[in-house]
Amino acid sequence: MPVVDIIALPAALPAYTPLVGLDLGEKTIGVAVSDTTRLIASPMALIRKSKFTEDAAALFKLMDDRGARGLVIGLPVNMDGTEGPRCQSSRAFARNILRLRPDLSIAFWDERLSTAAVNRMLIGEADVTRARRAELVDKAAAAYILQGVLDRLG
């Protein structure tokens, strides 16, 4: 399956398969997963980046364990709506994933301010320490991104 528009994503997937959301950071990949009805996103894991093939293998294991066949990748669009080097990197990641697993469906979601929103939540509402916040923020941002998609599709 190719990269698809977010609205076309559910039709590209088997019914009752969860979606996986990704927040691609410089050093880590935050991973979140939806339930099988695609209503609720939950933080799932944090992959510490090393070599692409190792990162992809870790991601595929998480997806296979859950039966997920679709990916939503946060696209770090600039505040003015333009796409910079980080967007190009995210799109390259998707292309490389599809080379290894062409059966997956991938969609992108504008993730502007997702990390800031998650940090505010962790500081304000959850009162999480700075060290613990660093551990949680990427996978929580992945859940925030994925929940945005689920809400849009719902």
Image: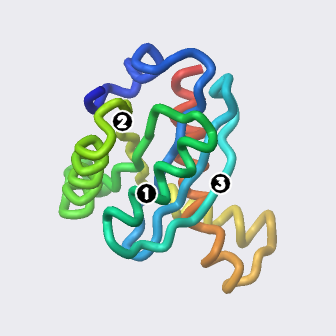
Q: Earlier in the sequence, mark 3 or mark 2?
A: 3
The number of numbered badges drawn on the structure is 3
Q: How are the colours assigned in the image?
A: rainbow
Q: Amino acid at mark 1?
A: Ala
The residue where tag 3 is placed is 44
Q: From the top left corner, tell me how far across and down residue 22 is, in percent.
A: 47, 51
Asked whether the residues under the numbered discs 3 and 2 touch, taking CB atoms below 8 Å apart as contact, a structural biologist would say no
* Residue displayed at 80% across by 66% down: 126
Image quadrant where one finds the C terminus = top right
Q: From the top left corner, tell me how far across and down residue 29 is, in percent.
A: 47, 63
Side of 98 relative to 84 (left or right): right
Which mark lies nearer to you, 2 or 1?
1
* Residue displayed at 62% across by 44% down: 65
Q: Earlier in the sequence, mark 1 or mark 3?
A: 3
The residue where tag 1 is placed is 57
* Residue displayed at 25% across by 48% down: 81
Q: Which mark is residue 106?
A: 2
